[in-house]
Image (spheres, rainbow, N blue to C red):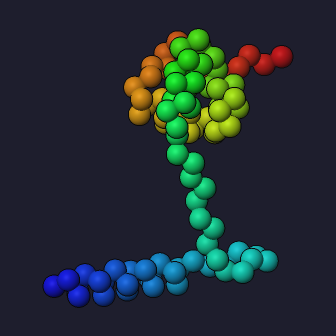
Amino acid sequence: MQGNLVEHAVRLALADSRLVEPRAGGDGKVAALARTFWTPEEDNRLRMLLGAGKPIEIVATELKRSAKAVKGRAYILRISLKRVKLKPKGK
């Protein structure tokens, strides 16, 4: 039974690798997703900045994260975005 699972996993991995087409001018390798985990210090800074009502774009810039990452982390930490401006005022 265990051998069948391993064989199945190998077949799936090979099938996935065949579906990936090389990029123009690339070497055919798939780029790994950049993933930076949130630290407790960043979580505290996120709480402080969002609690002060800073816009998501400003918070994202200060934390060197994307706006989507900031919104996602706020959701995970159950930080309300109701009082937060979603975009800074344009000048």
Q: Position of residue 60 (x, y in %)?
A: 65, 32
Q: Where 57 sits versus 54, above or below?
A: below
Q: Quadrant of residue 61?
A: top right
Q: How many badges with numbers are in the image? A: 0
Say which of 19 and 61 sits in front.
Answer: 61
Q: Where 50 sits versus 5, above or below?
A: above
Say which of 76 and 12 sits in front.
Answer: 76
Q: Residue at x 40, y 26 (%)?
A: 78
Tell me the quarter of the image containing the N terminus. Answer: bottom left
Say which of 76 and 43 sits in front.
Answer: 43
Tell me the quarter of the image containing the C terminus. Answer: top right
The reply, left or right, for residue 16 in relation to residue 9 is right
Q: Residue at x 37, y 86 (%)?
A: 11
Question: Does residue 59 appear in this view?
Answer: yes
Q: Where 7 sits versus 52, above or below?
A: below
Q: Residue at x 49, y 15 (%)?
A: 82
Question: Does residue 84 appear in this view?
Answer: no
Q: Position of residue 9 (x, y in %)?
A: 34, 80
Q: Position of residue 66 (x, y in %)?
A: 63, 39
The reply, left or right, for residue 17 in relation to residue 76 is right
Q: Where 57 sits versus 66, above or below?
A: above
Q: Position of residue 27 (x, y in %)?
A: 72, 81
